[in-house]
Image: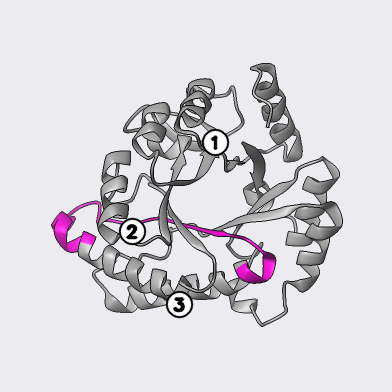
């Protein structure tokens, strides 16, 4: 299993290139880019705009693993067709950026539900599946994979539901991401990994508490990361483990978490 770090901790105070240099200077070999302004602004995309960033990655021998777009403002399962179209437009632009950076996975949520009066599941699922099939068709010749992950605000809650959605979409371009901080409100993260064993394309790791949704450094919450990674090994997963942490201490919190993994005999 290989290690990567999400750029979340530097969203508000560092450029993409500065963030890559911080990670590279500390021996990190893989990076997942958080795609959100002001850190990573898709509206700025033009062909060639990320060539310099790609050269910085190559300078450090680093790999761009994935691009991850938060879902707070967008929704592929929206009842509004205009919102679905806008969201797909952003994902297509993100796919172009991912190709320029050499990333292989586009991490997205399956879509949100209305918290007060959610529509019938089959209806909202039909919107999501249609959007995902259109995105998969767009990505068919790119080498990119969509990695769906659950979030507390999604219409998909459990790993079993996510597995079913991926299978119903039925595209080799649509897989699943398991995130400890996102699944723990519904189920044990180790169990979620085992449920998604055939669909997994990426693992996310951070700590959190069941009563408060955060993405914190390891050892600060309730996540049993040892059993989570043991379950991943049992599935035969050999891809990247992304530390998707929001650390006030920046790289310090990331490095402490890596040392905790090594202390458990988990060499990444």
Q: Residues within 10 Å of mark 1 (few under 14, many from 20)?
A: many
| Residue at 28% across, 77% down | 81
Residue 72 among magenta residues: no
Q: Are marks 1 and 3 in contact (CB under 8 Å)?
A: no
Quarter of the picture containing the N terminus is: top right
Q: Are marks 3 and 2 in contact (CB under 8 Å)?
A: no
Mark pair 1, 3: CA separation = 28 Å
Q: Which residues are magenta?
A: 99-125
- Along the line of sight, which residue is nearer the eye, 173 or 60? 173
Q: Position of residue 62 (x, y in %)?
A: 76, 52
| Residue at 40% across, 71% down | 135
Q: Quadrant of residue 98?
A: bottom right
Q: Residues within 10 Å of mark 3 (few under 14, many from 20)?
A: few
Q: Which residue is mark 3?
A: 89
Residue 112 vertical placement versus 256 (above, below): below
- Along the line of sight, which residue is nearer the eye, 70 or 114? 70
Q: Residue furthest front?
A: 236
Mark pair 3, 2: CA separation = 15 Å
Mark pair 2, 1: CA separation = 21 Å
Q: Quadrant of residue 266?
A: top right
Q: Which residue is mark 1?
A: 205
- Along the line of sight, which residue is nearer the eye, 21 or 168? 168
Q: Residue furthest bottom?
A: 46
Does dot 1 land on a helix, a strand or a loop? Answer: strand
* Res. 111 mark: 2
- Tell me which label, 3 or 2, sits earlier in the chain: 3
Q: Residues within 10 Å of mark 2 (few under 14, many from 20)?
A: many
Does dot 2 land on a helix, a strand or a loop? Answer: loop
The color scheme shown is one colour
């Amino acid at each position: 299993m290989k290690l990567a770090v999400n750029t979340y901790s530097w969203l508000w105070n560092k450029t993409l290139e500065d963030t890559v240099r911080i990670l590279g200077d500390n021996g990190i070999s893989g990076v997942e880019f958080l795609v959100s302004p002001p850190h990573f602004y898709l509206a700025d995309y033009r062909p060639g705009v990320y060539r310099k960033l790609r050269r910085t990655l190559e300078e450090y021998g680093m790999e761009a693993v994935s691009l991850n777009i938060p879902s707070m403002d967008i929704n592929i399962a929206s009842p509004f067709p205009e919102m679905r179209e806008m969201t797909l437009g952003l994902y297509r632009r993100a796919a172009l950026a991912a190709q320029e950076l050499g990333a292989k996975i586009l991490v997205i949520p399956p879509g949100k539900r209305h918290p007060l009066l959610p529509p019938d599941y089959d209806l909202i699922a039909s919107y999501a599946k249609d959007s995902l099939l259109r995105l998969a068709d767009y990505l068919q010749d790119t080498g990119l994979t969509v990695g769906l992950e659950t979030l507390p605000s999604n219409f998909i809650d459990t790993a079993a539901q996510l597995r079913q959605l991926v299978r119903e979409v039925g595209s080799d371009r649509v897989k699943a991401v398991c995130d400890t901080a996102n699944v723990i409100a519904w189920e044990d993260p180790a169990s979620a990994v085992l449920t998604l064993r055939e669909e997994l394309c990426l693992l996310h790791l951070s700590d959190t508490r069941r009563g408060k949704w955060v993405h914190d450094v390891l050892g600060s919450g309730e996540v049993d990361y040892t059993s989570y990674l043991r379950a991943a090994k049992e599935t035969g997963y050999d891809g990247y483990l992304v530390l998707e942490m929001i650390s006030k201490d920046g790289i310090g919190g990331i490095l402490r978490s890596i040392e905790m993994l090594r202390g458990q005999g988990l060499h990444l």
